[in-house]
Amino acid sequence: ASEWKAFFAEDTTENRGDDKLSDLFNDCHRFEAFACHLNREFSLEVLLAFIEMIQFKQYFRQVYFGEEEEAIALFAGCEIRFNFGKQPLRSEIVYDTVSLDNCNTVDASGLDAADVNKQQLIDAFKKIAYSLYIRYIREACELEINIASKQRATFVSLMSDELKWLNQTQIGAEELSCIFDSVCKELYSLMNHTFARFKNTEKKSARAEEMAEIILSMSASSSPEPVSLEETRL
């Protein structure tokens, strides 16, 4: 009885303190569990879009500006750093849509930033940005994300005409680097609502495991001593 009283008297689950969604991305085990939770809620595309758009910014800043930071600042006090464990998730759209072999990249060639053909890099990443738009933002696309209609209209106006976007639209490096920032912030906000439900699920799961352990320990302690055949003889 004392075990049950103690169990219900206090919360024995791990106290995570100021538990933030951004911290979860750097914990491969919780990250995987959170992805499964999003999938059960039929909103996994929110996480997929977030990952690919963050990687877009990270990769562009790496090859264009020569930055090597593992974390991307989304807004004040929020840095995104992914920890995928032993099998890192790598966006095929971001890293494999176009070949950068003909672009003098800073990280691969060791050339000074002054030697980089920066316009070629911008053109290459405009193609990557368009592919992300086609996958996640264009109306009725395969993995359409839930963002504000005004925000979607901005991208439609900018990228609905592929040739115009690729060949005529002028965009600077910093602007291109941050092109998906507003979308990522909205996706982060959406996932934050899910994160609250996820933490509640974690808590219930941990409590259920503790309850099972208590039941097993009580069952073991209350089991009668085995009786030998000698003791049963008259």
Image: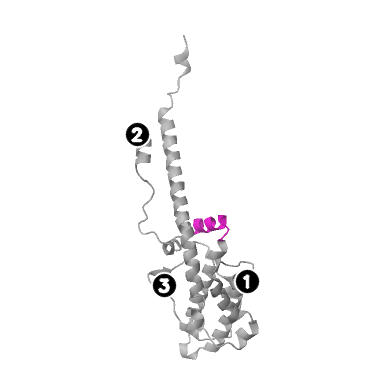
Please tell me which residue is depicted at 47% across the width and 65% down the height of the picture: 189
Residue bearing the label numbered 1: 139
* Mark 1 neighbour density, 10 Å: few (under 14) some (14–19) many (20 or more): some
Task: Give residue 2's mark.
Answer: 2
Amino acid type shown at disc 2: Ser
State which region is magenta: 31-43
* Camera sees residue 112: no
Sequence-first tag of 3 and 2:
2
List x then y, in percent, for residue 155. 57, 77
List x then y, in percent, for residue 9. 34, 41
Q: Nearer the viewer, residue 113 or 20?
A: 20
Q: Look at discs 3 and 2 and give the one toward the viewer.
A: 3
Q: Secondary structure at mark 1?
A: loop
Check residue 215 for magenta coloring. Answer: no
Between the C-alphas of marks 2 and 1, the distance is: 59 Å
Please tell me which residue is depicted at 54% across the width and 56% down the height of the picture: 36
Q: Is residue 77 left or right of residue 116?
A: left
Q: Is 51 situated above or below 170?
A: above
List x then y, in percent, for residue 44. 56, 61
* Camera sees residue 15: yes
Amino acid type shown at disc 3: Phe
**Residue 127 position by quadrant:** bottom right
Sequence-first tag of 1 and 3:
3
Amino acid type shown at disc 1: Glu
Residue bearing the label numbered 3: 75
Q: Look at discs 1 and 3 and give the one toward the viewer.
A: 1
